[in-house]
Amino acid sequence: MFLHSSRTRSLAVAAIVAAAALALTGCTSSGSSTSSGTTAADTLVAYTGQSGDYQLNFNPYSPSNIGGIGTIFEGLFFVTNVNSDPYTPLLGTEYTWNADGTQLDVTLREDVEWSDGEAFTADDVAFTFNMLLETPSINTGGFDGTVTATDDTHVNFTWSHPAFVDGPTVLGRTYIVPEHIWADLDPTTDVMEKPVGTGAFTLTNFKAQAFTLSANPTYWDGEPAVKAVRYLSLSGNTAGADALAAGTIDWQTGPVPDIQNVATNYPGYDAITVPQNQMVLATCSSAELGCTGPQTDPAVRQAIYYAIDRDQANSLAFEDTASEISPSLALTTSQSDLISSALEEPIAPSGADTKKSDGLLTGAGWAKGADGIYAKDGEKLSLTAEVVTGWTDYITALDTMKQQLKTAGIDLTVAQSSWNEWTDKKGKGNYQLAIDSLGQGPASDPYYLYNNYFSTANTATVGTAVSLNIGRFSDPAVDAALAVLKGTDPADTAARQAQFDIIQASIVQALPYIPIMTGGTTSEFHSSKFTGWPTLDDLYAFPAVWASPDNSQIYKTLVPTGK
């Protein structure tokens, strides 16, 4: 067991303690002051999984950004994809759409200052969005409207098309930067070493192995109770678990031994597992777009779906942290009310149903050979599933499914490769199956997943690289439903549900992404040192330490206990 360490493991923990102590320059024992005016009791030590030197760059629009999103640079509102609550006002206080979704008016907060003392105004908002329009490489949210500052506290956005679905990105996932500094910068190349923002924290110390964000005393919503957030670099997941055992970090997201018993194994800590990432066997599904192999037969994809024993895979590969999944790919937690009532099976079966699998295959002309494996027209039902080397949970899941599928007459080979090779195969369609997870988009709304992974616009013929619809799925009815959703007011739930019903009926029949389970993201946190952590009953933000801007919302909510 993890707590019954050998002398070797004790020495390793001691080394982690020493490394963390060195990185925590400026922090002392609980209750004693530091040179920066904070104490160990009100400093939160975070480990994001960083295992090498930090490279100083707080440009929120740079792919090499190491932090500051949400904490230093704020959006207009806080928008999360773990709940459907109204957006939390930040730099914006109110917003309204016109009837057809072509204009969005936003009222801004008054008397906000940048951390250098300059006044924040609507001109900064207009500048930020115009910077995105002028710099396509950083316009990852795809903003294609116009923005006008009508006075210091009002901006309006206009589009030539209905843009309701762009709301979460515009309002919550675009980080406002100060015009008086950024007007002279190249956002694609300039490194931001001294970031100036409106957020609750400012950068006060940086070293290659750690950096500190300190509470902003002039923050518009008041100085946070957490006075500093210290980010450490360690050597990996094992080092993170050792640091938890030593009590030298306060928050991390990742696996630890005996993950179901964190509170027992790590006194003073608790854990939360949030079902958010939907694990699938992605398939190159479309023969019309150039995919080859047995997986292009919908009956084969359906047979695999029924041949999986999800309970067994969960136990062996995921320490029972995964949970149920809907074949509609709407989350069964926060989006259950959007699962079509017309679906016969709204939840994927937990155990294998080889009788159903056999019926699907024989009905499609497949017949079992003497070796127990199905074949058709001289082609054996043999498939290769791609996985990244080192992804131990996914590798175990595939090895488990290999045995399950063999029982159902399907031969599965597991192929490990580098992340780059795995990504290249998926993107160009040079694969049969690949274990992966599907992203949820900027808000808790299945539209974003459907648009990303099922829109014809996001796929191409095999050989042409795509980043989203790697299943090579294309259905005119789904495309038409997505187009209607783009122009439908989110408040019109009945009209939206009619389109979701169309999409779900198609994808459940086709299964280009074969649902496995909903993966649980587990975080461990120091509950005796800070109160106010998200719970499953109050999931006000996604509690992963690396998730921005959600982590900033959590930092602002936490209250040190003084312990």
Image (tube, helix red, strand yellow):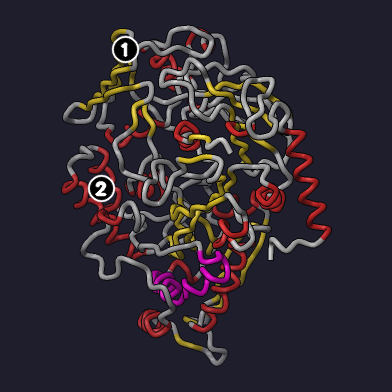
* Residue contact at pointers 1 and 2, CB within 8 angstroms: no
Q: How many marks?
A: 2
Judging by the rendered image, the residue that carries numbered circle 2 is 480
In space, the residues marked 1 and 2 are separated at their CA atoms by 38 Å
Judging by the rendered image, the residue that carries numbered circle 1 is 153
Under mark 2, the amino acid is Ala
Residue 105 is labelled as none
Residue beneath the point at 52% across and 39% down: 530
The span shown in magenta is 298-320
Residue 290 is situated, as x and y percent measured from the top left of the image, at 48, 58
Q: Is residue 313 above or below residue 66?
A: below
Residue closest to the eye, 249 or 521: 249
If the image is split into quadrants, where does the C terminus sit?
A: top right
Residue closest to the eye, 557 or 306: 557
Q: Is residue 371 above or below residue 434?
A: below
Q: Is residue 200 visible?
A: yes
Residue beneath the point at 23% across and 37% down: 487
Under mark 1, the amino acid is Thr
Residue 174 included in the magenta stretch of the image:
no
Residue 156 falls in image quadrant:
top left
Residue 318 included in the magenta stretch of the image:
yes
Name the main secondary structure of what is drawn in magenta: helix
Question: What secondary structure is marked by label 2?
Answer: helix
